[in-house]
Image: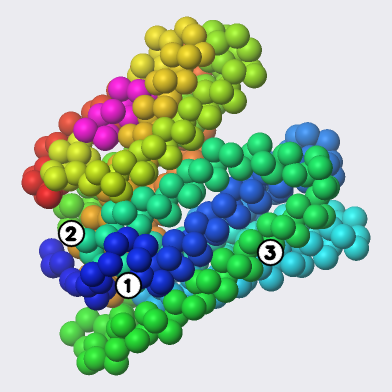
Amino acid sequence: MTTEPTARSLPREPLGDPHLRRLVVGQGLAAVVDALFVIWLTLFVLELSEPGIATGLVLVAVALPRAALLLPAGVLVDRLGPARVAASASWLRVAVLLALGALVTLTSPSVTTVALLAGLLGAADAAYFPAALALLPAVVPTEKLSQVNALVQGAESGGDLVGPAVAAAVIAAVGFDATLGGITAMAALAAVVLSTLVREVRRGEGAGDDPGPDAIDGEQLSSARALGAGLRYVWHEPLVRGMLAAVALINIAVVGPVLVGGAVLADQRLGGAGSLGVVLSGFGAGSLTGSLLAGWRPPARRGWTVVGGVAAIGAGVAGLAAVTHVVAATAVVSLVGLGSAFLGVVVVVTLQERVPKQLRGRVLSLVVLATVAFDPFSYVVAGFLLPYGTTTLFLVCGGAVLACAGVVAANPAIRSLR
């Protein structure tokens, strides 16, 4: 596997360069917007209809196009460039939010209308997520990737941690219309900031003599063949294949058990459903800590760090089988969050550094797919195992992740990674 230079070397500190500051601010704002809007959307749909299937349908309307369009979006990122796609997707998000705001303010929209607009936001997300990941190595010097990724993912974790409380409090204070207006203003600011990077990335890449992002031996590929080339690259690279498989399995074995199993655990052992909020706050705090640690204390031996991170997540999930107090449960879930976030930064940075530039969009779209598209399967796994008790659920899922750590340790390409 070849390692390409990712950006010009800058002598300054992580945020000393204005382009890096704009990158962190733009992507950080976009992450906060996502966290706030999900809560706004959920509460607004509950306001429109009785709690039940309507809320789930609207959230599915966001998730389905996002998952279905991720891989084609990866081809688009490689073809048009990550800066242009990230900026365009950000402006599409602003346009949809403005349309939704006009409907909410001037009419009484139906759940169907809200779901259709939410689906457009899901399509914008499908383009934005891989573009944002591929944009970092186009702007950030290689030696600073860990720190900048940590800041961006830390903003996402921070939004997840405080977003629900902030969004609910603001809605209660000023209403749905004004809150959506504030979210739209933040999204517009993020789009403006990210748009300023388009010219800079073009200038940094230069004209050169590159035959094109979809070219193999000088031959331009169709979109379908370009996507196939990306998938073949992933399959034939043991390092990339192993990391993507580990991320997918962790997502399946952790998301459903922690959310669904955690709710049952809180009701049965931790003093009531209200304690679930405390436990999930621990996950958010652990994620924020893990992201920042991965940036400011990058591991010297990445391969064994990946193995240790997977093992820590598995041990944490399995450990939930034994907890009987909310403090213990919060501590264990914090460990899972810390390991997940730390591992996420290490995996993303490794792929940003080592995947050839012309394939980054396609490979990183698979990373996003592995982290967001398998949630429904995770809920199915949790639902299948819950009748056997939460102890069985957590032991089986935690054991699967621990077994994955063993498989990762047996992969020479990952084990020897530095």
Q: Is residue 131 visible?
A: no
In the rendered structure, which amino acid carries the disc numbered 1?
Ala
Is 7 left, or right, of 303 in this rendering? right
**Residue at left offset 80%, top offset 40%:** 172
Above or below residue 415? Residue 146 is below
x, y percentage for residue 73?
46, 68
**Residue at left offset 37%, top offset 80%:** 201
Asked if marks 1 and 2 touch (Cβ < 8 Å), the reply is no
Above or below residue 229? Residue 393 is above
Can you tell which mark lies on residue 185?
Answer: 3
Can you tell which mark lies on residue 236?
Answer: 2
**What is the distance, in whole Å, between disc 1 and disc 2 at their CAs?**
25 Å
Above or below residue 385? Residue 346 is below
* 84 and 212: which is toward the camera: 84
Task: Identify residue for label 1.
Answer: 138
* 148 and 111: which is toward the camera: 148
Q: Say few, some or many: other residues with alpha carbon within 10 Å of mark 2 (under 14 / 14 to 19 / 20 or more).
A: few
In the rendered structure, which amino acid carries the disc numbered 3?
Ala
Instruction: Identify the mark nearer the N-term, 3 or 2.
Output: 3
**What is the distance, in whole Å, between disc 3 and disc 2 at their CAs?**
44 Å
Quadrant of image for the N terminus: bottom left
